[in-house]
Image (spheres, rainbow, N blue to C red):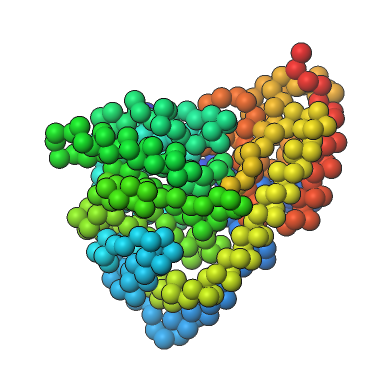
Amino acid sequence: MTAVGIASGRVSAMADGLTGSSILKIAGDVRALREGGAEVCDLTVGDFKPSEFPIPAMLLSGIEDALRKGETNYPPSSGMPSLRAAVRAFYAEWLGLDYPVESILVAGGARPALYATYRALIDPGDVVVYPVPSWNNDAYCHMVEATPRPIITEPADGFMPTRESIADAIRGARMLVLNSPLNPTGTAFTAESLGEICDLVLEENARRTDDRPLFLLYDQVYWMLTFGATRHVDPVSLRPEMRQYTIFVDGISKAFASTGLRVGWLVGPPDVVAKMANVLGHVGAWAPRAEQVATAKLLGATAELTAYHDVMRKSVQARLTALYDGLIALKHDGFPTDAIVPMGAIYLSARFALIGGRLENGTVLRTNEDIRRFLLERARLAVVPFDAFGSREENGWCRLSVGAVSLGEISAMLPRLREVLQSVKPAR
Ligand code: PLP
């Protein structure tokens, strides 16, 4: 996607070379099967089914109330003062991060915040470093004509980048993009591993003699969703000197199952945030005014937030654990499945090591896409191979997303999976 395609002449070379979301294409296959009457366990979209994961009641009533009170016109382009103040207090209370309101820019979800960061920091040809698998960095690089420098990660590290994998890649780079907990893997940084990476960023910046620093874009939209012993960590709390180089991206889409409400924000050094506000102002990618007013109230309501989160985290974790346990039970019974213990977000890294496997009709599964189709058509299990997140290896690793399924759908799917796996002859 990053090589600019030959423009058809009707659109720009950039638009011509930008591909749509492959996850949405897979979701289209699921829809078609369902329309034919099939029951499908849909683990594809990074979204929530409102009947399984409703938004906080306070958010709903807050939006209704704000609309009734006439909060229907343009919001200020950097965000409603009440929301910027609420984000400031929220970060101070929950994360121990102390930022002035000038550091906070509200946007219509995390995506415009990501785009504004890329747009405001990157000149054509600048190097952007990010691990794969990861979400959408290839598209943002393409849009701003960055030179992408993807780094490969390993299942043994939970697909998280390490000091070793990043050390050379950040030399001369303009931006490092990290996300924890990580979409698509459901894994997260430890304080030790992120701290080591921050040290590298600080060393690289200390070496620079010009005024073009290496920035860190830290996407923490899933930070409220961590499980078990996992605690969310961030660069600025670990290494306060990282503050001048770090842009946080965050929002309510995932933490409050509110993907359709479109409220996000970024937090960073005030001088660059002011430029990002200009970028977003011209795009008009503000969060809707009533949603901003209601989000401000929600972020300040610690008791309601805690109560909502206790329920949400348990519900997400129960689904991830059911999938994890199911896949590991199959592995113990000799089937070629594997999974990584879920640490956060709404995802599980799962492996269906079926490359080279032969079906009864003689068909051989040769690619991740073959595996995906096989699981969908035979087990009615819909997953997204890591190819959709920039991985190039045909190894059967996939993202399983649990926001749109019930526990019942997962337990109904696992026996179907066992049955179809029995029908595959392993690779010779
Ligand atoms: N960042 C990450 C890591 C995501 O996974 C997503 C959505 O899937 C987003 C940002 C986008 O969030 P939003 O819906 O608020 O634009």
Q: From the viewer's perspective, is residue 147 above or below residue 179?
A: above
Residue 6 appearing in the image: no
Where residue 319 appears, as percent x and y from the top left, is: 70, 53
User: Furthest-left residue in view?
Assistant: 210
Q: Quadrant of the C terminus?
A: top right
Horizontal side of residue 79 vs 158, given as left or right: left
Marker count (numbered): 0
Q: Quadrant of residue 407?
A: bottom right
Q: Quadrant of residue 72?
A: bottom left
User: Furthest-top residue in view?
Assistant: 428
Q: What residue do we see at 33% from left, 47% from top? A: 239
Q: What residue do we see at 36% from left, 69% from top? A: 89
Q: What residue do we see at 47% from left, 28% from top? A: 152
Horizontal side of residue 252 vs 419, given as left or right: left
Where residue 30 appears, as percent x and y from the top left, is: 68, 46
Q: Is 152 in front, or is 224?
A: 224
Q: What residue do we see at 44% from left, 41% from top? A: 192
Q: Quadrant of the N terminus?
A: top left
Q: From the viewer's perspective, is residue 328 above or below residue 239?
A: above
Q: Is 166 in front, or is 2?
A: 166
Residue 130 appearing in the image: yes
Q: Quadrant of residue 15?
A: top left
Q: Is 13 in front, or is 218?
A: 218
Where residue 125 appears, as percent x and y from the top left, is: 26, 32
Where residue 306 appears, as percent x and y from the top left, is: 55, 69
User: Furthest-bottom residue in view?
Assistant: 69
Horizontal side of residue 284 vs 360, given as left or right: left
Q: From the viewer's perspective, is residue 60 above or below residue 378?
A: below
